[in-house]
Image (cartoon, grey):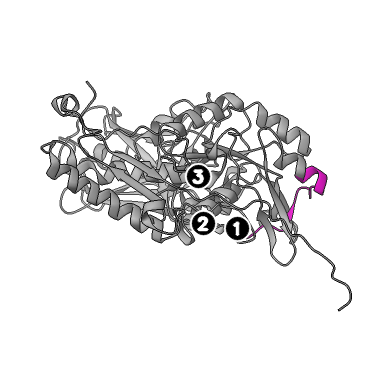
């Protein structure tokens, strides 16, 4: 038997009713970044992202993806930094006066960036230690082995922890505090040093070294495990990723976790090549492909007018979540309202024939176009599935939203007595939620009866189901479909 909980089965009905409102969705970026930890980190602004993972870099286009995400209206982003399989984390060792290892500090993320990190320790009057993580900003410090004082006046303080215990596990111990709270380093003991006596106020600086970026392929192992614990709808993007196997792993995750994957084409592809590439991906309703790439300002360029060519997935993911917040998950994240701030030009502007090729492709590719008076806009709202209503992004994501919300709203029923009182309570909860979704515009129908139905009674809850601890809730909803093609019949009337 499964674990007690709420389980939802989605099915397509023959009638126009099928089994809404902002989502609790957040963005997820999976990218090779200049620095930062390899564990999952939540950020809510470009400033916070750049502080932890580094600023814009044309060598790390994921940084532009994150920047465009926030510029397009995204507000919450989970970051997964992937590194080369042969990358090495920088380390530093704190030693006792007899030269034996006391504590090893290790950068949380692999790569050469960790060689610029420093750990400053100061023993205070409480016989505990204050620890500051520094970033080298001037002349590299030369620090001998063992416990020594060192120059850190030119370094930048990244984070500080006070009153840490360096000797034993327990309250305020350095190992657990850094593991849970630090964005930059971990610590590990190589033995206690309780017998060591150091005057309060004495400071030591431990430099981290021997970090390496590596040159082998990027390691995506464990990425879906990292984000799997979030238990919420996600909009996932990996700027510039075109490897079909890795994208397949992400869409497989999305299919079972109420999530959606935004996919880029390669740079400089034709419309027909973009459709061909989309055809190599799984024909799933939980992902969509966008083209072309974008030109954006590059403040790292030596030229005042420097620009960089970057994939669109970050901007699109931000626009999807901004549409959720501003209009609702039931609104297709496309149209003149879905412009892309910060984009100065497109890699190429498709002709009308090429736009038809993208829109009519099997599967289709969503075009980004320049709209006169508006600028670059997302002008496609199709998934990679072509056979049913979930070919529309808003339909697929509305179903994901409803599934997520109904599961959470019905948790109260778990372990309650499965009788008519519970059926009435569950029906009331679902009815109230769907009424609100309908009133916001998430469902079709002029009245509630034509917009949705909820069935929880003896017909779909047999005595056998009740005896087996099963409560069956049947819900039908009439979701909104987007208007993609506006037909105008213009007739010239003469004689007036």
Q: Earlier in the sequence, mark 2 or mark 1?
A: 2
Q: For this rendering, which residue is in front, 281 or 165?
A: 281
Up-down relation of residue 159 to residue 269 (above or below): below
Count of numbered marks: 3
Q: For this rendering, which residue is in front, 372 or 454?
A: 454
Q: For this rendering, which residue is in front, 269 or 200?
A: 269
Q: Is residue 20 visible?
A: no
Q: Is residue 344 magenta?
A: yes
At x 52%, y 28%, the residue is 87
Q: Which residue is mark 2?
A: 323
**Mark 2–mark 1 contact, CB under 8 Å?**
yes
Question: Quick one: SS at disc 1?
Answer: loop
Figure quadrant of residue 361: top right
At x 15%, y 43%, the residue is 422
Q: Residue furthest front?
A: 495
Distance between the alpha carbons at the discs numbered 1 and 3: 17 Å
Disc on res. 239: none
Up-down relation of residue 71 to residue 12 (above or below): below
Distance between the alpha carbons at the discs numbered 2 and 3: 14 Å
Distance between the alpha carbons at the discs numbered 2 and 1: 8 Å
At x 67%, y 28%, the residue is 279
Figure quadrant of residue 185: top left
Q: Is residue 405 visible?
A: yes
**Mark 1–mark 3 contact, CB under 8 Å?**
no
Q: Is residue 341 left or right of residue 432?
A: right
Q: Which residue is mark 3?
A: 395
């Amino acid at each position: 038997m499964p674990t007690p909980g709420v389980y939802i089965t989605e099915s397509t009905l023959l009638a126009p009713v099928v089994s809404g409102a902002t989502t609790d969705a957040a963005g997820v970026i999976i990218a090779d970044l200049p620095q930062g930890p390899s564990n999952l980190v939540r950020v809510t602004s470009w400033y916070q992202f750049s502080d932890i993972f580094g600023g814009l870099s044309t060598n790390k286009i994921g940084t532009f993806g994150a920047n465009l995400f926030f510029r397009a209206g995204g507000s919450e982003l989970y970051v997964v930094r992937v590194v080369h399989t042969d990358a090495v984390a920088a380390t530093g060792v704190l030693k006792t006066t007899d030269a034996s290892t006391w504590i090893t500090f290790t950068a949380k993320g692999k790569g050469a960036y960790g060689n610029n990190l420093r750990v400053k320790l100061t023993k205070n009057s409480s016989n505990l230690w204050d620890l500051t993580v520094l970033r080298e900003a001037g002349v590299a410090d030369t620090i001998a082995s063992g416990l020594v004082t060192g120059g850190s006046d030119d370094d930048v303080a990244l984070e500080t922890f006070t009153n840490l215990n360096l000797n034993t596990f327990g309250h305020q111990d350095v190992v657990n505090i850094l593991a849970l709270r630090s964005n930059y380093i971990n610590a590990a003991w190589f033995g206690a040093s309780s017998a060591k006596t150091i005057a309060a106020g004495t400071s030591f600086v431990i430099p981290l070294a021997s970090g390496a970026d590596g040159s082998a392929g990027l390691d995506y192992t464990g990425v879906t495990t990292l984000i799997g614990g979030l238990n919420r709808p996600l909009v996932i993007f990996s700027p510039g990723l075109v490897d079909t196997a890795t994208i397949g792993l992400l869409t497989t995750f999305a299919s079972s976790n109420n999530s959606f994957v935004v996919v880029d084409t390669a740079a400089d592809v034709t419309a027909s090549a973009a459709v061909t590439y989309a055809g190599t991906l799984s024909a799933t309703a939980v992902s969509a492909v966008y083209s072309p790439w974008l030109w954006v300002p590059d403040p790292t360029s030596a030229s005042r007018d420097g620009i960089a060519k970057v994939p669109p997935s970050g901007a699109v993911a931000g626009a999807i979540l901004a549409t959720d917040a501003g209009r609702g998950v039931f609104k297709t994240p496309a149209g003149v309202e879905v412009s892309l701030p910060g984009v100065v030009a497109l890699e190429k502007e498709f002709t009308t024939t090429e736009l038809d090729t993208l829109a009519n492709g099997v599967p289709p590719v969503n075009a980004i176009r320049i709209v006169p008076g508006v600028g670059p806009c997302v002008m496609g709202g199709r998934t990679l599935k072509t056979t049913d209503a979930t070919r529309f992004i808003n339909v697929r994501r509305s179903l994901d939203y409803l599934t997520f919300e109904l599961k959470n709203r019905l948790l109260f029923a778990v372990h309650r007595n499965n009788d008519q009182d519970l059926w009435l309570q569950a029906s009331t909860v679902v009815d109230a939620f769907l009424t609100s979704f309908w009133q916001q515009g998430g469902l079709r129908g002029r009245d509630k009866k034509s917009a949705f139905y909820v069935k929880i009674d003896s017909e779909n809850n047999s005595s056998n189901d009740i005896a087996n601890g099963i409560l069956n809730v049947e819900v039908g909803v009439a979701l909104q479909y987007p208007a993609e093609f506006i037909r105008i019949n213009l007739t010239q009337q003469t004689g007036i």
